[in-house]
Amino acid sequence: MSISAVSRRDFLKHSMAATGAAALAGQSLLHAAEERARRRPNVVLIVTDDQKLEHFGFLRKKALTPHMDRLAGEGMLFTRAYTSTSVCTPSRFSCLTGRYASRCSAPSFLRSYTKERQTNVQWNTLLDHEKFTLPKAMKAAGYVTGMVGKWHNGGPQAWGRIRSKIKPADDPADPRVAKTLAEAQEAIHAYIRDQGFGYAAAINMGNFGSYPIRTMRCHNQEWITKGALDFIDQHKDKPFFLYMATSLMHGPSPTQSLKADPRITHGGLLANPVAGVQPSRQDVLERTRKAGVPDPLAGATWLDDGIGAVMKRIAEHGLDDDTLIIFFDDQGMEQGKGSCYEGGVRTPMFVRWRGRIRPGKMPALVQGIDIAPTVFDACGIEPPKGMAMDGTSLMPLLRGETKTVRDSLCFEIGYTRAVCTQQWKYLAFRIPPSRRLTLEQRKAMIERYAANKLKHEDRVITNKPEDPLSHLGYPGGQNTEQGGPMRRYRKVYHDPDQLFDLEADPGEQHNLATDPQYRPVLERMKAELKKHLARMPGTFAEFKTR
């Protein structure tokens, strides 16, 4: 056999092998593309706590928040986003159910109904008795579900029993105390798993005032961040749903927590500080001071670093294009918390899903109740039969298919209900007859409230029993209200009917309800509120009598 024949044979053999390898590689790429197309998206729902507008660099140019700025810039920023109620617990209830908080079925909430069957939404909307929730539905649909951070929607009875063994002045390094705190955290994790989360880590039960040891009432963002990163690492190969609810920027002072012992967590005192998951606390302070950011805003950078670490880990696993990230601040903090005013219900919201949704700004009216239906739509999940939701999917907005999904929004808290359109806002303040308290009843209410606040070392206000009842039903208002809405909106606060032109008066300072010129608008807005309330449980004065 000639050399040339051998060469031709080897050439053909190598060519065939190369062609086969190329074909296999092509098939492999095609298979990977098909797998990518078939894979349902991951979802990361980030809910922050009490963030003011100045805590977002892209909104007020005061804080150093490059990662949140990037999320908002690469995604859809909703400029007219709202929560349906303006305190932590009911806001989170709506995010995790797609329903108004007044639909809560927890016995503690049902007991708050007045004799007139008027609902009283406050910090009483717990998730314990909800058959249908976003995490439960996601888990049933085959998603791996996880939760880290602040819960604030109920808790296990075991938590109360274990907590009662701890004294405010106890030393967390004491072995007995450490063991008890660890038991409490495990009881909390078990409870969170019962709420539909297969994974739970770094959980804060609620606000810091309820934590049993005074010296440990500190934020620990690194602890929460590590819990989120561990979840992503463990479940990167399966579709996952992560609920990351931060404790920042709620009190106590984030800046003071930055300077506190980094071993402090709600699960007890760590053996060593969490390290390597995000820039150090000292680095946060150095960067913010170098950038000219005041120390009181440094906590926003600390929070931003945690969100940035999650974004980075998602990218490192090649999941950027497969992950829908929804960011929602639990309520407005522009001196309106605890009210239906814009300062309490209007809040930042942005959504990023690279390659799937249009970046930009969107002025459509959207709300926290829309989060659950949006997630179901994006993931191709049919909600469980019987899971009725008040919200609507925002995917048509995110895909650029429409410019609006509704004409008006409804709000609820305490003894107020409100409705807004793009231009108008109407608020009704109605104290039911059964809650028009006697002087003695008012005095007893003030004493109970003050005693509870003193127990948790919070600021206590001194009210008079004869002070007018607030929107939340307290004589003279409680801390949340006096911290903002009763001051900022003092000219209109106690008016039973309030009408505002949000275009001309975004600060809601001029009540037009008694101006004959606006009577048609007032009647139209009252009718709009009546339409919303007709679909909701409970009564509300003349708007819904049964």
Image (tube, rainbow, N blue to C red):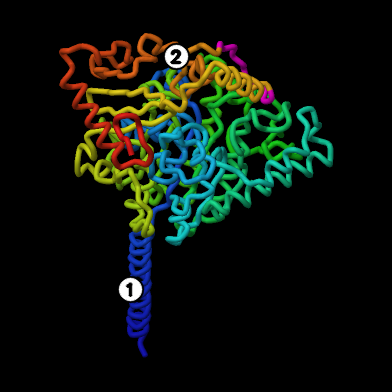
Kind of residue at disc 1: Thr
Kind of residue at disc 2: Met
Residue 462 located within the stretch drawn in magenta: yes
Q: Residue furthest bottom?
A: 1
- The residue segment tinted magenta is 455-464
Residue 141 located within the stretch drawn in magenta: no
Q: Which residue is mark 2?
A: 486
Q: Is residue 362 visible?
A: no
Give whichever of 95, 277 is nearer the camera. Answer: 95
Q: Which residue is mark 1?
A: 19
Indicate whether 277 appears above or below 523.
below
30 displayed left or right of 123: left
**Which one is earlier in the sequence, the residue at label 1 or at label 2?**
1
Indicate whether 212 appears above or below 13.
above
**Residue 65: where, in percent of width, then height?**
46, 27
Task: Please tell me which residue is depicted at 52% across the width and 11% down the height of the picture.
Answer: 466
